[in-house]
Image: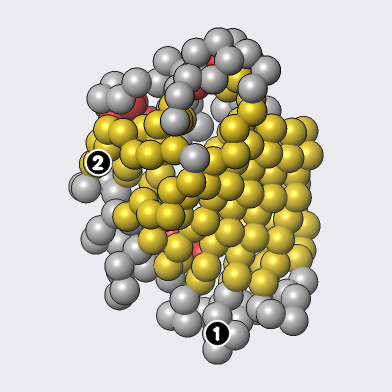
Amino acid sequence: MPIDALWARRERVANLLSKVDTSSDLKLGRISQHDRIEISADGGQKSVWVRQILRAEQDGPDRWALVFETEESDVLPEIVNVRNCHLGRIARDHEANIMVAEMMFERPLTRGETLIMEYQLVFPEGHAPKGNNTFARKFRLPVREYVIEVRFDEANLPSRVQQYSVPAGDETPSRRRNLTLDSGGGVHAVALGFGPGVFGIRWEWPNR
């Protein structure tokens, strides 16, 4: 399955991917992925913290191809707080609000070697996108463990939160489960042995 296969605006994503090196992608096994999304008081997604554990299935992978798409924002996020990697080339489609970036490893990995990589996507104040009250991760290859957290501002809590998944080839969510907010105004969901497909969390606001 091509990297762009699960994206609705596939042609635009493919165009951006052509501007970076994606040759390492199939050489990397997805061991673990953890996303933490921070929602501001106005309902916008102000930041996304990401932690990935990757394993080299062959000698030589030296980068991760990041694809990020947002909605309802006039700017793309900044990539900050990078750990165990550094930024390479970045390609942006400002009209479609899609970004592709090379996350370069400190050195090429050897077969069987693992890497813990972290980074954060942060929107400027006042530009946090609503994103249709949804955050989802697309997996074109299986991941052993995926953890997704959404943290809401306690001044504005949703009335309903639900996890969902869409296996590759399906058009609508096939599995849904209601989630309960914890005492800090957050929820999380865990997927094991998931993919290819889309896994995410969606929420509804009171009286909206």
Q: Which residue is mark 2?
A: 92
Q: Can you tell which of label 2 and label 1 is closer to the viewer?
A: 2
Point out residue 103 in the picture as x, y percentages from the top left corner: 41, 35
Give the structural element (helix, strand or loop) at label 2: strand
Task: Say which amino acid is labelled 2.
Answer: Arg
Query: Dot 2, crowdedness within 10 Å: few (<14), some or many (≥20)?
Result: many
The residue that mark 1 highlights is 156
Q: Secondary structure at mark 1?
A: loop
Residue 15's spot in the image, x, y percent? 27, 26
Separation of marks 2 and 1 at Cα, in angstroms? 32 Å
Closer to the camera, 20 or 201? 20
Q: Nearer the viewer, residue 100 or 176?
A: 100
Residue extending furthest toward the bottom = 155
Which residue of the protein is positioned furthest toward the left in this rendering?
A: 95
Q: Is residue 134 visible?
A: no
The image shows residue 39 at horizontal and vertical percentages of 51, 71
Give the residue drawn at x 78%, y 39%: 192
Q: Quadrant of residue 207?
A: bottom right
Residue 66 horizontal/vertical position (percent):
42, 37
Instruction: Determine if residue 80 is in view.
Output: yes
Relative side of 104 to 143, left or right: left
Q: Residue at x 42, y 15 (%)?
A: 23
Amino acid type, residue under disc 1 in the picture: Asn
Return the mark for residue 94: none
Identify the mark nearer the N-term, 2 or 1. 2
